[in-house]
Amino acid sequence: MKPIVQISLDITTSREALETAEMAMRAGVDWLEAGTPLIIAEGMHGVRALRERFPDTPIVADLKTMDGGYLEAEMMAKAGATHVVVMARAHEETIRCVVKAGRDFGVQVMGDNMVCEDMVAGAKWLEDLGCDFVIHHIGYDERRGIAARGQRMPSPLDQLRQVVAAVSVPVQAVGGLTLEQAVKTPEYGAPLVVLGAPLTIDAEAFKTASGDLESSLRLICEKVHAYGDVKVGKK
């Protein structure tokens, strides 16, 4: 699978999301994500605004669905999303409902294993229930809370190879990665690279003389795309 750069628009207004998305697309980003903050603030309207501006670009709606799976997936599909996110900790029937809606409305389902007691088993569970992708995810509050107690902050890289080896669908790793770490996830067999926005270019290899954010993001996209084919599936 060719590696994909996805930008997560963790922004609370459609106007700012569109501005950031415009910059990201010029730089070579492949997929746009209506991040959870944008979904909360703008809902279907934010997704619809992205679809109208970018008619041919894959759009992920990061719903983090826990219940009402069919309706949520249907609403986002009708607004223009091509991918929706359901949580592994949801009830089995909720995941099945999202998968059914995906098939009915032509959207793909990304299953998120955040807060699973066994992250590898959670990823396999999502695949078994029909998810098209697995998001291997360490949550924001979890990371910050553990770090605040003076313990080592967990990283999705800790078990990424095990997750990739356990499933046959593409995997993306999310949660507290530096840009430098995110860009290297294809080396672990995870071809979907996620960059959060607002962006802070902090990896030395991607800084430009002018400090121009778009140019830095372009360098990141070129680095990811240069990996070529990434093998997807159980090793």
Image (cartoon, rainbow, N blue to C red):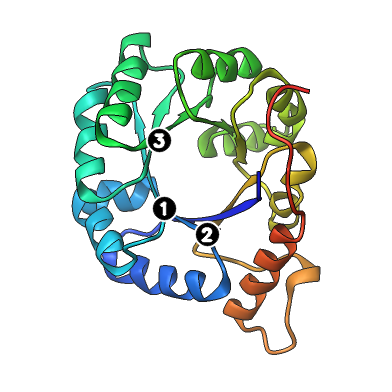
Mark 1–mark 2 CB contact (< 8 Å)? yes
Q: Is residue 219 left or right of residue 134?
A: right
Give the number of the disc on residue 171.
none
How far apart marks 3 and 1 lie (CA) works out to 10 Å
Q: Quadrant of residue 186?
A: top right
Give the secondary structure at mark 1.
Answer: loop
Q: Measured along the vertical axis of the image, is residue 96 above or below residue 184?
A: above
Q: Residue at 59% of width from left, 33% of height from top?
A: 138
Relative to 122, 31 lies left or right: left
Name the residue: 57% across, 69% down: 28
Circle 3 sits in a helix, a strand or a loop, which is it? strand
Res. 83 visible in picture: yes
| Side of 197 where 74 appears, left or right | left
User: Which residue is drawn at the image coordinates 42% and 25% (left, top)?
Assistant: 87
36, 189: nearer the viewer: 189
Is residue 90 positioned above or below 232 on the image?
above
Residue 66 visible to the viewer: no
Label at residue 58: 1
Q: CA distance from mark 1 to mark 2?
A: 8 Å
Q: In the rendered view of the protein, which quadrant contains the N terminus?
A: top right
Whether 3 is drawn above or below 130: the answer is below
